[in-house]
Amino acid sequence: MTRDDFWRLLEGLDPETAEEQLRERLEALELAEVASFADHFDREFDRAYDWKLWAAAYIMDGGCSDDGFMDFRFGLISRGRKVFEAVLADPDSLAEMPDKSSFIPNEAFGYVAREVYEAKSGTEMPRVEFARRSEPAGEEWDHDDDEQCAKRLPKLWKKYGNKS
């Protein structure tokens, strides 16, 4: 499976039922393709490990733990390539999402490929090892610093930030 094939499998998923739709699509694939999908998923998930994106999630949700940021990145991938790439290039673009679709986190979406693989094979899915980031990319700053958040992510801060 190529990276383009990976993203094609994610096209047009409804945010409300993304994990169920993905499950159906993956169940139609051979085991090797499901494993390849999971490898691409892990690599895109790692690409999104970024301080500025974490700050965006923090502002939008009024806080964001390590686990919350994982769920946020799972959900961001579920939105497809166009949204994913746009948000990675400019996390502040999340402010332009309609309110009804602005809730991004989707914990269940991150586990679909493994669950499908294990159900089809009866064995644990092998993981492809690659150099994962040990820390988020970019510059870290205090996400509780209103001034920094307003300066670095002005659209998100205007829409979701603490106005007090």
Image: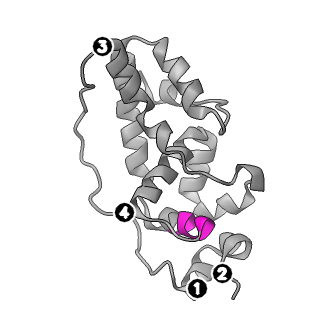
Query: What residue did someone put label 4 on?
Result: 136
Question: Quick one: quadrant of the C terminus?
Answer: bottom right
Residue 136 at x, y percent in the picture: 36, 63
The quarter of the displayed image where residue 37 is located: top left
Rounded to the nearest angstrom, the CA distance separating label 4 from label 2 is 24 Å
Q: Is residue 57 magenta?
A: yes
Comes first in the chain, label 2 or label 3:
3
Rounded to the nearest angstrom, the CA distance separating label 4 from label 3 is 34 Å
Q: Secondary structure at mark 2?
A: loop
Which residue is drawn at the image coordinates 43% and 43% (left, top)?
44
Residue 92 at x, y percent in the picture: 63, 65
Query: What residue did someone put label 2 on?
Result: 162
Instruction: Tell me where the magenta segment starts and ends, as one range.
Output: 55-61
Rounded to the nearest angstrom, the CA distance separating label 2 from label 3 is 48 Å
Whether the residues at callouts 1 and 2 have beta carbons within 8 Å, the answer is: yes
Query: What residue did someone put label 3 on?
Result: 121
Rounded to the nearest angstrom, the CA distance separating label 3 from label 1 is 49 Å
Image-based side of 136 in relation to 94, left or right: left
Q: Secondary structure at mark 3?
A: helix
Q: Is residue 96 above or below residue 152?
A: above
Query: What residue did someone put label 1 on?
Result: 146
Rounded to the nearest angstrom, the CA distance separating label 1 from label 2 is 7 Å
Whether the residues at callouts 4 and 3 have beta carbons within 8 Å, the answer is: no
Q: Amino acid at mark 4?
A: Pro
Q: Secondary structure at mark 1?
A: helix
Image-based side of 67 in relation to 21, left or right: left
Q: Amino acid at mark 2?
A: Asn
Q: Nearer the viewer, mark 4 or mark 3?
A: 3
